[in-house]
Amino acid sequence: MKNLFKIIMLVTAIFAFTCTVEARPRKATQRISQHQLAEKQAKKIAEELALSSEVSAKFITAYVDYRHEVWALGPRQDKQQAGSMTDEQVDSVIQARFDRSQKLLDIRKKYYNEYAKFLTPKQIWRVYDLDAKMMNRLSHRRTPKKKMISTPQVNRHISNNDEALAK
């Protein structure tokens, strides 16, 4: 009888635990839109620069527009290997990179002039610095983390691809 009571209590405890775990709200892993990301970045930069609310509103609008224009250019095409392409293909890839770089430069100049209407050159410098740090941090989130391998002779960092080759 004691064993039956213990089993019933155990089943009840397991049932109660699983019900409370399932009842908890799950953390949303939904990605935010590009517009929301740009707005969030702009607010963070405005906060770092300690801008007034009026200047902050102008900056956020300009920064969101800047980000949209940069994103409209599309991603960089750095993953191509020249060894598997003909000379003409390599040349066209290089020319496309030049074109993209020029478009990016034109956008940066355009928004520098826009920012200069309400920010000082030092503030604009800081905007570019903070923006680069944010973009760097975001790009590192997408790449696989490096693992530390310890050997008697040396400690070194390797990526997941290097680890597969090492085995």
Image (spheres, grey):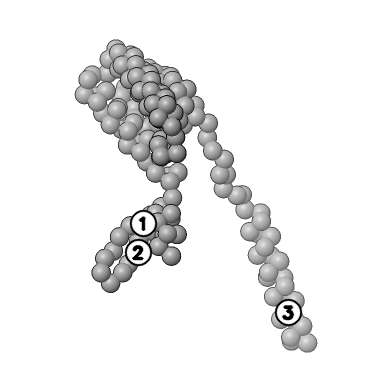
Q: Residues within 10 Å of mark 3 (few under 14, many from 20)?
A: few
Q: Please report contact status of discs 2 and 1: CB closer than 8 Å, yes or no.
A: yes
Residue 76, image x, y percentages: 42, 31
Residue 50 visible, this angle: no
* Residue at x 34%, y 31% (from the top left corner): 131
Nearer the camera: disc 3 or disc 2:
2
Task: Name the quadrant containing residue 80.
Answer: top left
Q: Secondary structure at mark 3?
A: helix
Residue occupied by mark 2: 149
Residue 139, image x, y percentages: 40, 40
Residue occupied by mark 3: 7
Which numbered disc, 1 or 3, marks the residue that appears first in the sequence?
3
Q: Which mark is residue 2?
A: none
Residue occupied by mark 1: 158
Query: Which amino acid lies under the numbered mark 1 shown in the image of this protein?
Result: Ile
Which numbered disc, 2 or 1, marks the residue that appears first in the sequence?
2
94 and 23: which is toward the camera: 94
Query: Which amino acid lies under the numbered mark 3 shown in the image of this protein?
Result: Ile
> On screen, 96 above or below 144?
above
- Image-based side of 40 in relation to 46, left or right: right
Real-space CA distance between mark 3 and mark 2, rounded to the nearest whole angstrom? 47 Å
Residue 159, image x, y percentages: 39, 54
Q: Secondary structure at mark 2?
A: strand
92 and 15: which is toward the camera: 92
> On screen, 30 above or below 94?
below
Real-space CA distance between mark 2 and mark 1, rounded to the nearest whole angstrom? 7 Å
